[in-house]
Amino acid sequence: MTGAWALDGRVALVTGAGRGLGRGIAIELARAGAEVVCVARSRDELQAVAAEIEAAGGRAHVHPADVTDERQVAEAVARAQAAGDLRIAVAAAGTNRPGPAVDYAMADWDALFAVNVRATFLTARAVGASLLARGVRGSIVTISSQMGTVGYPGRVAYCATKHAVDGMTRALAVEWARDGVRVNAVAPTFVLTPMTAGFFEDPAFREEVLERRLPTGRLASVEDVAHAVRYLACDASSSVTGHVLHVDGGWTAW
């Protein structure tokens, strides 16, 4: 594969790669030619993703890690550097624990900030430092949400973390732009993944989202999000940085 959309010869580190969006993103980047280092806590899930990538002719490495831990993130980045020319990082680890604000558990608040904000920053910082130290251009993609732009009942912590991700993304982009390190975010609407499946078992919630909130009337697919990440990871987006790309079916256009 050649051209601005190709990722041949590049190593991509993807966190949260064991399932959901991270899994789909890892597979898409491998399809584009990248050698992918798959990072998540579950070795079994990572091995399944790596096996799928390799069965399709791609190359993948498995690296179990807790990406809220600074040392473990550094080890994952070192593993990616050892694999080859690390140029791409996607911080796709994320979680959500909805609940009303008046009695929202602070343990849940702390958990969301640990995974959605701290882990995203640790990943971006470690890969950014690697790119800067080596003097090479690269692309870092964070995974935000439409909830980084709007509010929503019962998601005070999730909205707060995703607003933080958007701000972090823009600040890092400005700081590293002159060094050729691009930082962007992809902000999807609801995607049917293991994390969100339970929400859509509620008929009232499903109707509100599909009939009242989404102009397109459909959820985004994992592939929709993965394609957006691929665009931001490759040279086709070489003049794009500090951008939050909404893959949200028009939710934030209301």
Image: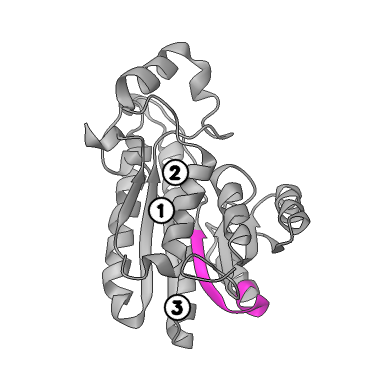
Q: CA distance from mark 3 to mark 2?
A: 25 Å
In the depicted view, which residue is nearer to us: 233 or 57? 57
Please report contact status of discs 1 and 3: CB closer than 8 Å, yes or no.
no
Which residue is denoted by mark 2 in the rendering? Answer: 112
Among the two numbered marks 1 and 3 on one chain, the one whose residue lies closer to the N terminus: 1
**Tag of residue 117:** 1
Q: Is residue 66 left or right of residue 44?
A: left
Element assignment for label 1: helix
Q: Earlier in the sequence, mark 1 or mark 2?
A: 2
Q: Determine which residue is flagged by label 3.
A: 129
Read off the magenta span. 80-90
**Amino acid on which disc 1 is placed:** Val
Look at label 2 and name its amino acid: Leu
Identify the secondary structure beneath mark 2: helix
Percent position of residue 220, x then y: 45, 35
Q: Nearer the viewer, mark 1 or mark 3?
A: 3
Return the disc, 3 or 2, that comes first in the chain's sequence: 2
Tell me the residue at 30%/33% (across/down): 251
Circle 2 crowding by C-alpha within 10 Å: few under 14, some 14–19, many from 20: many
Q: Amino acid at mark 3?
A: Ala
Depicted 69 relative to depicted 248: above or below: below
Going by the image, does 19 lie left or right of 175? right
User: In which image quadrant can residue 231 be found?
Assistant: bottom left
